Image (spheres, helix red, strand yellow):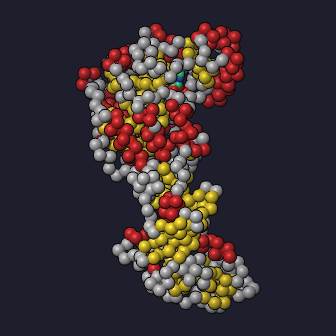
Amino acid sequence: MFSKILIANRGEIAARVIRTARRMGVKTVAVHSDADARALHVAMADEAVHIGASPVGESYLVAEKIIAAAKATGAEAIHPGYGFLSENPDFVDQVTAAGLVFIGPSAASIRAMGLKDAAKRLMEKAGVPVVPGYHGEAQEYVLLASKAREIGYPVLIKARAGGGGKGMRRVDHPDDFQDALAGARREAKAAFGDDRVLVEKYVDKPRHIEVQVFGDNFGTVVHLFERDCSAQRRHQKVIEEAPAPGMTPEMRKAMTDAAVKAAAAIAYSGAGTIEFIVDGSDGLRPDRFWFMEMNTRLQVEHPVTEMITGIDLVEWQLRVASGEPLPATQEQIRLSGHAFEARIYAEDPAKGFLPATGTLHHLAFPGDAPAGASMRIETGVRPGDAISPFYDPMIAKLVVHAASRPAALAALGAALEQTEIAGSTANVGFLAALAADADFAAGDVDTGLIGRHQETLVTAPAAGAAVVETALLAASGLDRAEASDDPWSAFAGYAHFNPIARRLKLLHGETEIAGSVSMIDGRPRVSLPLAGTVDDRGGSGRGGAAALRTVRWPGHVTVFDGAWNHDFTVPDPLASAADAAAGGSLRAPMPGLVKLVRAAVGDTVGKGQPLLVLEAMKMEHTITAPHDGQIAGIVAEGSQVADGTVLVSFEEAPALAVAG
Ligand code: ADP
């Protein structure tokens, strides 16, 4: 076994590889860009090497820097993770030439599968079923159009160098072929620098089912069953599962046999995935699945396979790459239960899944696995980390396993409901809606399901009165009084005599919400002009099953209602008080206690200088000078002040700065 490896990746996959390496007693070296200097994977590794600026082209994609980092730290092998350099055969050649081991297949295996057209020709020869279509060298429009007619519409045009669904066009009618071809070519040229395409039959009610394979350096190849990744949005996987719903013994045998044959045909070593497209229009039938492509690396969704087999695929990768035979025979690999993985992304489903950035001011995952299930959270970020525009906006993968599909799906839903993210928009509600979708729950999935149900899946429930009231209460700070032993502590000194009412304004999207919160008989009472009054936080507007939870973060309150969240902007009352003070005086933005006074009448103060500390709503607020000036009057330390009380007044004309 290696004594030290370098992980040429970042985020959750780097963290995941480090975890297994550490368990095996293998030392780890992380590499990182500027943006990732304080990232989780850097903190987890035994050593870390800075390899360049934040853009991937200046760091994670620079083979020379990564190899130099491995040499400098004495790492013997490089784990590429997924993405970045993981399927770049030239990188493998460079790693090998440097006397290091690439933890993955040979450059020759990657090349054989690198282009979809060549891979399909190879698979056809090996006796693996491929989608009926044209994958030849000739690329003239007339030829491709006639091939499309032969294949029969609808057809799918694909970039031969494709990946991530780029350069792909479905064409339903011959009249649209020319435009679609031009579009696919443009996209392929831009993304891969290669505009050659193949044309294949568009499979009806397509399901994406892939088989995990594993080979070693002694010619053995095994499979670790299948995963279903049909829940896709524009060809991107959203929720993956293993095994495939509705899988039959005959279909599984046919698919896994074909997958092992495909990997053996290229003498495959390491972890790989054979992706098949399946016609699911009539159940799963052994004559209706076809090879699509092979991914010659660890997949994002590999944890679902680990959950159903109990095998650590990264451990197997390290063992095989270090020259050991496969740790188990085909017969020893058993399937148990059902697993789901949901990909939590910083993106806004309601706005066309626009990628989001921001700081994860609040990030909380379920503390325990839902009853009867086991759970894994694969993440590369911690609370307070930023989602930068430089990298994939994945926040985490939530992976659950239970004895049956319904139990695992229920666990997934429950875990999503306990996931809290604030500071960046995330797709948690969308994932929960998909997990709760009737067709998905029935296992009736095809790659079009999300598209057909999109409208429903992306629509957050409206923020009802309970949510708005909860937001107002959280913004007021009075909810915290409930948490303390003494509900009066927040109002020490005056609340007994002056029941306070605090007016608040919040913004929910474009909508301004005004309300007030008061303490009556020791309980906060929220009044909304339209929705009447409730006397405490109340429960969820949706049956009260899940209590509403709130977090406050700079300038905002987020209310979590199950897996959905509602963000409210809290206009800063101190900022507006300061604005208002441009004239003669500075007023208390809320009732409170003057805890500290730092200036005296006659003092000349500069803009931004702290003048006093006001304690209100259990928090201390430093009141600073809104502009340069000379103090004409200032409130006494220890005074109780009401909303709007003048705290500081200034001399009419700003004093001249006095030198010395
Ligand atoms: P990429 O490498 O760009 O991800 P794939 O060949 O893996 O492209 O295909 C991506 C997705 O497109 C598949 O998961 C499937 O949903 C859909 N797809 C691919 N080929 C077909 C086909 N022949 N018919 C219908 N859908 C297809």
Report whether residue 354 is seen: no
The front one of 56 and 165 is 165
Left or right: 644, with 427 as reference point: right
The spot of residue 22 in percent (x, y) is 32, 43
Residue beneath the point at 39% across and 24% down: 211
In screen coordinates, is 543 left or right of 153? left
What residue is rendered at 31% in x and 42% in y? 374
Front-most of residues 24 and 561: 561
Quarter residue 198 falls in: top right
| Residue lying at 62% horizontally and 62% vertically, measured from the top left | 512
Asked which quadrant contains residue 547, the reply is bottom left
Residue 218 visible in the displayed image: yes
The quarter of the rendered structure image containing the N terminus is top left
Check the image and report above or below for 213 versus 79: above
Q: Quadrant of the C terminus?
A: bottom right
- Residue 151 located left or right of residue 345: right
| Residue occupying the point 38% across, 42% down | 412
The vertical placement of 577 against 28, above or below, is below
- Point out residue 74 in the picture as x, y percentages from the top left corner: 39, 39
Along the line of sight, the residue nearer the viewer: 519 or 345: 519
Image coordinates for residue 447, horizontal then vertical, percent: 50, 28
Tag count in the figure?
0
Residue 588 is situated, as x and y percent measured from the top left of the image, at 59, 80
